[in-house]
C-alpha cells in the first residue's frame, strides 16, 4: 500500500482515528463504488439491477464484486438500500429468460413535497460514504 494511503489519517482534519484493516478498506471502497453506480443509474431513471451494478463496480475497481459483498454492505449499513426481487426487470443486455427474477436496488431518498423526483448529489454520496466508514469503525471498537 502506498505511503499516501497509509498515512491519510494523519493529513485529515480532526483527531486521528482508527485505521481500518485492509478488508474493511476494500469493503468501504466497494460501498462507495456501488453508491456511485447506483446514483448514476438512479439519476438517469433507470431500473437499478444487480447485474448493472456488478458490471459497473468491477469496471471501476478492477476487483470482483458479488452478492456476498452486497450482503456485507447491508450488514454494516442496514438503511443503505432497499432490495427487491422483481420479475421482468430489464437488463442492459436483455440476456436471460422472461421468467427470471432480478435483484433491484433502490436508494432510500426523502422526497420533498412539491418537488420533482429526488436526485442523488455528490454531497449525498460523500455523506453516505462517511456514514459507512463510521459504521465500520464502530464495528472495530
Image (cartoon, rainbow, N blue to C red):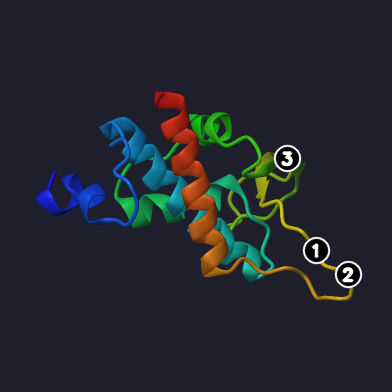
Which numbered dot is residue 50?
none
Tag 3 or tag 2, which sits nearer the N-term? 3
Name the residue beneath numbered marker 3: 84
User: For mark 3, does the 10 Å Cα neighbourhood hold few (<14), some (14 to 19), or many (20 or more) residues?
Assistant: few
Name the residue beneath numbered marker 2: 113
- The secondary structure type at the circle numbered 3 is strand
At a point 75% along the width and 48% down the height, the residue shown is: 88
User: For mark 1, does the 10 Å Cα neighbourhood hold few (<14), some (14 to 19), or many (20 or more) residues?
Assistant: few
Which numbered dot is residue 111?
1
Q: Is residue 54 visible?
A: no
Instruction: Using the image, determine if residue 44 lies above or below residue 91.
Output: below
Observer-side mark, 1 or 3, equals 1
Q: Are marks 2 and 3 in contact (CB under 8 Å)?
A: no
Q: Are marks 1 and 3 in contact (CB under 8 Å)?
A: no
At a point 76% along the width and 59% down the height, the residue shown is: 110
Q: CA distance from mark 2 to mark 1?
A: 7 Å
Amino acid at each position: 500500500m502506498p505511503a499516501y494511503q497509509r498515512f491519510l489519517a494523519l493529513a485529515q482534519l480532526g483527531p486521528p482515528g482508527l485505521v481500518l484493516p485492509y478488508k474493511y478498506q476494500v469493503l468501504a471502497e466497494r460501498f462507495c463504488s456501488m453508491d456511485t453506480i447506483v446514483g448514476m443509474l438512479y439519476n438517469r431513471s433507470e431500473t437499478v439491477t444487480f447485474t448493472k451494478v456488478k458490471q459497473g463496480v468491477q469496471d471501476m475497481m478492477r476487483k470482483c464484486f458479488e452478492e456476498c459483498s452486497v450482503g456485507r454492505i447491508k450488514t454494516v449499513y442496514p438503511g443503505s438500500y432497499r432490495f427487491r426481487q422483481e420479475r421482468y426487470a430489464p437488463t442492459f443486455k436483455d440476456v436471460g429468460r422472461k421468467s427470471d427474477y432480478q435483484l433491484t436496488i433502490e436508494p432510500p431518498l426523502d422526497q420533498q413535497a412539491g418537488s420533482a423526483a429526488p436526485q442523488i448529489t455528490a454531497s449525498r454520496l460523500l455523506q453516505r460514504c462517511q456514514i459507512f466508514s463510521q459504521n465500520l469503525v464502530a464495528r472495530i471498537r
